[in-house]
Amino acid sequence: MTPRDTDLTQAGLAPSGRGRVLLLACGALAHEIIALRRMNGWDHLDLQCLPAIWHNHPERIVPAVQDIVTARHGDYDRIFVVYADCGTGGQLQAACDALGVRMIAGPHCYSFFEGNTRFTEHADEITAFYLTDFLTRQFDAFVWKPLGLDRHPALLDMYFGNYETLVYLAQTDDADLTARAAKIAARIGLTFERRFTGYGDLATALSQA
C-alpha cells in the first residue's frame, strides 16, 4: 500500500519486519525508495521512515536514528541510514560512524537528487529556493504554515525577498506536479525553473545497500 504524504510528514512509516537490510530514512524519501525497490526487485530491503517534518527540527533526527539503530541492529544484517546531513551540522555522520552504519553522502536531498557532483557546480546559487516532488506536494505543511504565511502573508517578502528563482528538482516527469511547482513560484514571487533529476545519487546509494 502506498503511504500518504500527510502520514509521512507527521508520523513517518513503520517497517514491515521483512527483509535483511533496514533502510532508515526520512519520510520525504519514502515514495522514491519504494519506487526504486519495486523497479529493481530489491525485496531484501525493508523501510522505516522518520517524520518528514523533522527537516524543520533537525535536532530530533540524530537521537531518533541512534535509538532505532541500537534497538534494531539485531533484527537485520545491516542498517543503512537514508539521510544526508540535513541540517545536523555533521552530528548525524558522527553518530553513524559511532554506530558503525553507513549513510547517504551529501548535505541534503536537493544535492543527492541532482547528484552531489553536479549540485556542487551550482554552489553559487545562493538566491535559489529548491523543491522536490515531495516538497511540492507538501509545500503548505513544510513552508507556508510553519512560517506563519497562512496567518501573516505580509511576511512573504521578509522570508523570500532575497531569493530570485524557485528550482524544482523533479524526480518524476509529472505535468501536474510541474504545474503545482510553477504556481508555488508565482505565489512567492520567484522565477520558475524545472530540472529533471530522476532519483540521482539515491538510486546509486540504495544499489550499494
Image (cartoon, helix red, strand yellow):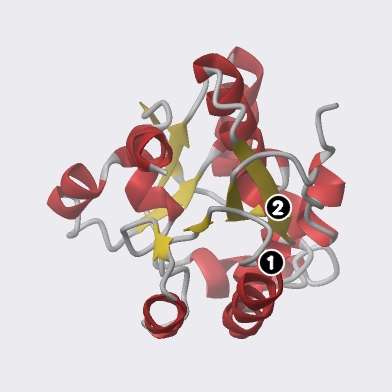
Give the residue drawn at x 61%, y 20%. Answer: 38
Q: Is residue 56 visible?
A: yes
| Label 1 sits on residue | 72
Q: Residue at x 47, y 30 (%)?
A: 170
Name the image quarter holding the N terminus: top right
Point out the image quarter for the C terminus.
Answer: top left
Whether pointer 2 and pointer 1 mark residues with C-beta atoms closer than 8 Å, the reply is yes
Give the secondary structure at mark 2.
strand
Residue shown at 68% from the left, 58% from the top:
75
As drawn, the label of residue 48 is 2
Amino acid at the residue labelled 2: Gln
Q: Give how far across and how far down residue 93 sits, in percent.
A: 38, 76
Q: Is residue 108 left or right of residue 187?
A: left
Q: Is residue 93 above or below residue 8?
A: below
Residue 173 in sight here = no
Residue 120: percent from left, percent from top? 17, 54
Report crowding for label 1: few under 14, some 14 to 19, many 20 or more residues within 10 A (C-alpha): few
- Looking at the image, the residue that sits furthest to the left is 121
